[in-house]
Image: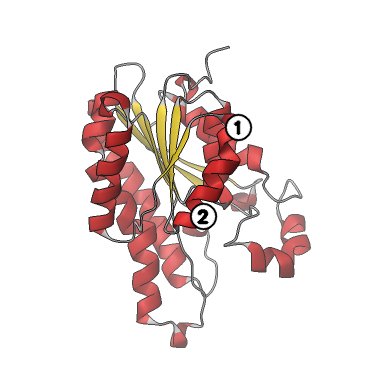
Amino acid sequence: MDLFSLAGKTALVTGGTRGIGLMIARGLLQAGAAKVVISSRKAEACEKAAAELSPYGTVTAIPADVSTEAECVRLAEAVTAELDGGALHVLVNNAGATWGAPLEEFPAAAWDKVVDLNLKSPFYLTRALLPALRAAAVEGDPARVINIGSVDGIMTPGERYAYTTSKAGVHQLTRVLAKELGPQQITVNAVAPGPFESKMMAATLDAFGEIISETVPLKRIGRPDDMAGVAVFLASRAGSYVNGAVIPVDGGLTTL
């Protein structure tokens, strides 16, 4: 079946060297993507992840710190130069950071760091890549923007003030951009992951993994294929009529 095929498509995954980003990059390649570009701050991590992913298809790694507008623009230019005809079919805005501290002690610098990366960078990078997305967009098979939000942007966790606020902002930004870019044959959707094994979640899962698993209605932590599956759905013909959605991938956690 070609309903979920990504044959001939190109993609960029930010934060694609580990965790959810790596899960998505692998899934896109396994679904037949012609080329996947991954990016993160550290060149060494980019090289390592590219080597890990290379058995699945064509991968290019471009280091960039997308917490700044200038780096988003530079990355967009570098990615476009890598693509045949400058066309980008799928943009996955995944790079993110978190910070936890009591309300009275929450530092301003942490607030800025989290919001800059989680909320500003998807806006700046999407804007910078609009020409490449428009070049890939055709009626019936739009270009796709997939923003990675969080169940923390739907629920009300404690002490992660900047993170939960930024992810709720990502969900609303997704809806606004979906309305504006839909007529240009560019869909914009968000995925709101629940608990998955990642560096960001490592300490929490080490301390509370069993409790969290028992709390989730499906009684487990998310697996790589769970995240890859929703990304492939949104990026393929199967998801071509989905626009402006925020999809929890959380085993039912947001129903509690």
Secondary element at tag 2? helix
| Cβ atoms under marks 2 and 1 closer than 8 Å | no
The residue carrying pointer 2 sits among few (fewer than 14), some (14 to 19) or many (20 or more) residues within 10 Å by Cα, namely: some
The amino acid pointed to by label 1 is: Pro
Looking at the image, which residue is at 57% across and 62% down?
A: 200
Q: CA distance from mark 2 to mark 1?
A: 17 Å
Residue 216 position, x and y percent, is 70, 53
Q: Residue 218 location in percent, x, y? A: 73, 45
Label 1: few (<14), some (14–19) or many (≥20) C-alpha neighbours in 10 Å: few
Where is 83 relative to 38, above or below? above
Q: Amino acid at mark 2?
A: Ala
Q: Which residue is mark 1?
A: 55
Which residue occupies the foreground of this view, 89 or 147? 89
Give the residue drawn at x 46%, y 82%: 103
Locate the N terminus by quadrant.
Answer: top right
In terms of image quadrants, where is residue 248? Answer: top right
Hey, which quadrant is residue 240 in on the image?
A: top left
Q: What is the secondary structure assignment of the residue under circle 1? A: helix
Residue 28 appears in the picture as rendered: yes
Residue at image position (51%, 55%) is: 45
Horizontal relation, residue 54 to residue 197: left or right: left
The one nearer the camera, 150 or 255, is: 150
State the colouring used for the structure image: secondary structure
Q: Position of residue 59 (x, y in %)?
A: 48, 35
Quarter of the picture containing the C terminus is: bottom right
- Snapshot quadrant of residue 118: bottom left
Judge from the rendering whether residue 81 lies leftward or rightward of residue 37; answer left or right: left
Where is residue 43 shown, x and y percent of the image? Answer: 44, 55
What residue appears at the point 51 percent right and 80 percent down from the top-left corner? 101
Judging by the rendered image, the residue that carries numbered circle 2 is 45
Label count reads 2
Q: Is residue 35 above or below residue 249?
A: above
